[in-house]
Image (cartoon, rainbow, N blue to C red):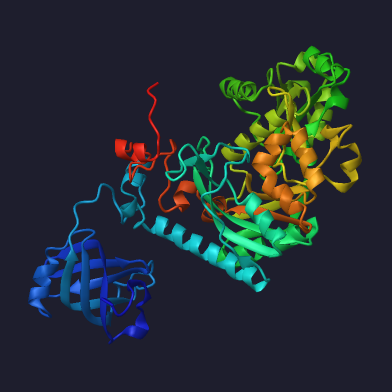
Amino acid sequence: MLKTHSCGELNKKHVGARVTLAGWVDRRRDHGGLIFIDLRDREGIVQVVFNPEVAKETHETAGELRSEYVVQASGAVALRPPGTENPKLPTGDVEIIADKIKILNTSETPPFYINEEVEVEESLRLKYRYLDLRRKRMKDNLILRHRVVKFIRDFLDDRGFLEVETPILIKSTPEGARDYLVPSRMHPGKFYALPQSPQQLKQLLMAAGIEKYFQIAKCFRDEDTRADRQPEFTQLDLEMSFLEQEDILVLFEELLISLVETVCPQKRLVKPFRRISYAEAMECYGSDKPDLRFGVEIKDLSKILVNSEFTVFRSAIAGGGRVKGIAVPGCATYTRGQLEELNQMARSLGAGGLVTISLGMCDGGIDGLSVEMVKSVASKFLSLEQVKQIARALGARPGDLLLLVAGDGDLASVVLGGLRTEMGRRLKLADPNTIVMGFVIDFPLFWWNKEVGHWESMHHPFTAPRDEDMCILDSAPEKVHGKHYDIICNGFEIGGGSLRIYNAALQKKVFNMLGYKDEEIIERFGHMLDAFNHGTPPHGGIAIGIDRLVMLLAGEESIREVIAFPKNQSAIDVLLDAPSHVNEQQLNELHLSIREE
């Protein structure tokens, strides 16, 4: 090795020892006679001193050093002079009195600061990702990711799970997004697909008798990118045989609690995990992945407003719709412009409009409100007592802003859910150091796709219906619930799974309900049905997005910050310039041609 110690491990116990270090020049300071550099490697930073009275030639070489030069330095560890210690560094009590220095490589001036946490335009960071990853924040994110994955592997190994790799080149089968296709040179006109998940393969492993499987799996989906989505991503994929739903939920609650408390002990994790139904999540939060770190729950106000003089409310309720609302704390002083901004946001989410009620400050709580203290375009249609009833139902206080929406079905909840999320962000209602996870359960098995005129899977077509709903699978499929579940964390879905269908006849029936013809079923899923006819046990599983989980643990807002070499918002690899054109010879070998649009 070119070094005897890492830069970050040196402290008082090493005083007097001779060491050899290697790393990058983080900073250089010339104080006339003495030259100081901060030498950095993956483990940390230590100060190295070059004194011409100790080693003249070494001091002269140190004068050539610049930021990001790669060097090897040797010398003795010494205590820093009193008053010059740096308490911000673990190595801040010591320094290296160098008598040898070797420049291993030089560096051009970096396009951005590496030794300072300053804002850098993302495209520049991605173009020079190898420099970006030298920065402490990014390095720490990769170390955190490593520790998360290692903990998961050790945890599952201790519980009898086998890590089994599944193929990357597979058959194209529908799983909810577009496949990435790979043309076959050996079989012209035919294509492999990159897996959206190992879903069918892990079920086949259960048919093979593996019983407990997991994999840190690469997955691929050709869909629009966003902050928490990438064309290629990594997930913890897991499947078990001979289990019930409770077995999966208990296992993963234990896994995630142990993981957070071990890897991120500085975070406050709320436990036990809350379990809420899909219906409750939509009713109270307007989202199937609500942020449970703060309240501001949606309440149904229809009973209070059923006889309201406000035509919008009365008509909506009479037509079978509902009026719902939330109370936003401390926002009664919002200006007309701010209220109009919220109104436009509600419209963008599908509402016909937004009714706002500002509650002025007063003594005596809601009971102390007077007509003069209530400001709303709906004031002339609502009595003071109705306003007070609404405020009480929403758990409001004087000084709060009430937001009301009328609509059919889940529309009011969805709109208010979007407003709840936005106001929670603006008002910083969620503690960034708190983690609140939970399980959303009892999803509908199907949803009706009006455009194509048939049912679609709420999760995926291999999800088993609840036993008690089997009797209405034909007569009322809209009322059938599935045996599936999501894991949510701080407003994100970080994972999901289900108990699977393992009976060939039931699986074929579900495929038929989803619009597949018999010949399509055999062509696309014949291997699954065949396996189910050869003694496949009851089984189920779950998958967790490693990227999203690490993003939340790291306190980042994009999964690109926890992936070593991510694609940008347009799914382009800026560093390698991919996707890119290929030459004519490569296309000919694959029997492909490019059609000009």
- Vertically, is 155 above or below 166? below
Answer left or right for 364 relative to 586: right
Question: What residue sits 65% from the left and 31% below the top?
Answer: 419
Residue 119 occupies which quadrant of the picture?
top left
Q: Quadrant of the C terminus?
A: top left
Q: Residue furthest front?
A: 187
Answer left or right for 413 relative to 194: right
Residue 253 visible here? no
- Vertically, is 346 above or below 116? above
Q: Position of residue 2 (x, y in %)?
A: 25, 76
Q: Position of residue 224 (x, y in %)?
A: 51, 35
Answer left or right for 237 relative to 482: left
**Closer to the camera, 224 or 9?**
224
What is the tally of numbered marks visible in this picture? 0
Residue 48 occupies which quadrant of the picture?
bottom left
Q: Quadrant of the N terminus?
A: bottom left
- Vertically, is 33 above or below 196? below
- Vertically, is 414 above or below 242? above
**Closer to the camera, 395 or 204?**
204
Question: What residue sits 78% from the left and 59% below the top?
Answer: 537
Residue 517 occupies which quadrant of the picture?
top right
**Closer to the camera, 73 or 596?**
596
Q: Position of residue 481 (x, y in %)?
A: 82, 41
Question: What residue sits 45% from the left and 52% below the top?
Answer: 563
Question: What residue sits 9% from the left and 69% below the top?
Answer: 60
